[in-house]
Amino acid sequence: MTITHLKSGKPDAERAEDDAKVRGIVEATLKDIETRGDAAVRELSAKFDKYEPERFRLTPSEIEAAMQKVSDRDMADIRFAQDRIRGFAEAQRASMTDIEVETMPGVVLGHRNIPVQSVGCYVPGGKFPMVASAHMSVLTASVAGVPRIVASAPPVNGAPHPAIVAAMHMGGAHEIYVLGGMQAVGAMALGTETIEPVHMLVGPGNAFVAEAKRQLYGRVGIDLFAGPTETMVIADETVDAEMCATDLLGQAEHGYNSPACLITNSRKLAEGTLAEIERLLELLPTRETAAVSWRDYGDVILCDTHDEMLQVANDMAYEHVQVMTDRDDWYLENMHSYGALFLGPRTNVANGDKVIGTNHTLPTKKAGRYTGGLWVGKFLKTHSYQRITTDEAAATIGAYGSRLCLLEGFVGHAEQCNVRVRRYGGVNLAYGGAAPYRDAAE
């Protein structure tokens, strides 16, 4: 049983140092936004995006003007993608039903799925304008029935990105802002003089955006920790090096700190993929980014068996996991920690990122061990309720409640039950006393 690292990225200690630097910057920035509001946001926008408009929120006419700049072909493609994503989100929403059951005569319990009342959707747009992120957050929130959807993306070349604005508007955004990075996330969560705070933040972003969401969690809800993208390829000799290398570099181009990992039981495939990556980097227009990411965050792990490959994959809990083996369904049945699975060579992570219908906002940094990705259910809160409809049920439940409260030493709690036992059960019960057993069966 051997697991061999043919290539490793930065050690964990160096990655932790990078994270610590980000934490300090984000903490100071959020404090500044909380203290100075719009003034801080404007300064940050000027500093990072060289953008200082009269106002950051787009008017209806500005939205329409931006959409007019999108070609008919691009608009058709956006509609196609949104139709796919909306259809899957609606199917997911339909799977979540309100329930009401009578658990014993006179006792009715239920729950309702209620939309979050306001959400801030961040759409990245720095190095690459992430049009698809608008579908994944804004449109999905709309399907969930969120009544106030705020969307924000950074300017591109000093102006709102037309296709991002179009996707936000078509997805159902009620407010659209041209703000990027920490200042967008901070303004939506904390509020300013001109931006009403939201109840929840969603959407992917760079390390600073992800850290801002982490620090803001508690004051607002968040979807998940969706930081720099991660991709993993699990492959055996049923696929070739070109396929593996292409899928690894396709995500490594996201940024300088995007982990990419190959797990295989074939030394031939592992070594071939390493060589193929070097060849493709000579051709890739985004090699400046992808090469650094692969150098610092790329891994190639050679295992003896599929069981070992599964063990390593579950332990790493990567965001995107492309499976190309002779037993893809076995991985589907046995993988338990990941963001999303892409099964077989016919599909790929880019399909999920842009068009196929599943959501691309997914857990990173091992968060897949305890949460899945963004989906319509993230925008819904499941709230329970109870009702007692008969005197007999009130007295029966009250008697049990009385005794169980006193078992824990809660007299005030017990009296909440006791007053019902007296009124609806006709029992003469001393204050603070335990309700009597009603019969031998109890």
Image (tube, rainbow, N blue to C red):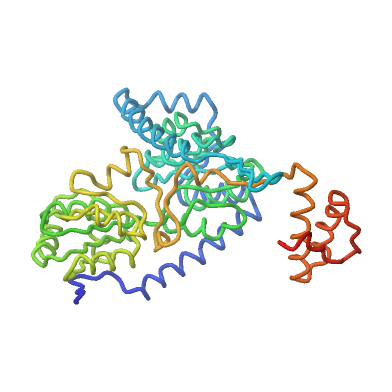
- 172 vs 315: above or below: above
Q: Residue at x 48, y 60 (%)?
A: 211
* Residue 259 relative to residue 111: left or right: left
Q: Position of residue 152 (x, y in %)?
A: 49, 41
Q: How many marks are shown on the rendered structure?
A: 0
Q: Nearer the viewer, residue 40 or 212?
A: 212
Viewer-nearest residue: 16 or 395: 395
In this image, 115 relative to 414: left or right? left
Identify which residue is drawn at 37% across, 39% down: 132
Q: With respect to residue 16, does 200 lie above or below?
A: above
Image vertical order of residue 437 relative to residue 320, above or below: below
Residue visible at 24% across and 71% down? 8
Q: Is residue 81 visible?
A: yes
The picture places residue 66, in percent across and down from the top left corner, at 43, 28
Residue 83 at x, y percent in the picture: 37, 30
Q: Position of residue 325 (x, y in %)?
A: 17, 55
Q: Is residue 289 visible?
A: no
Q: What residue sits 47% from the left and 38% below the top?
A: 93
Direction from residue 358 to residue 4 in the image, left or right: left
Quarter of the image containing the N terminus?
bottom left
Of residue 134 and residue 3, the one placed in the foreground of this image is 3
On the image, which quarter does residue 409 sit in?
bottom right
Quarter in which the C terminus is drawn: bottom right
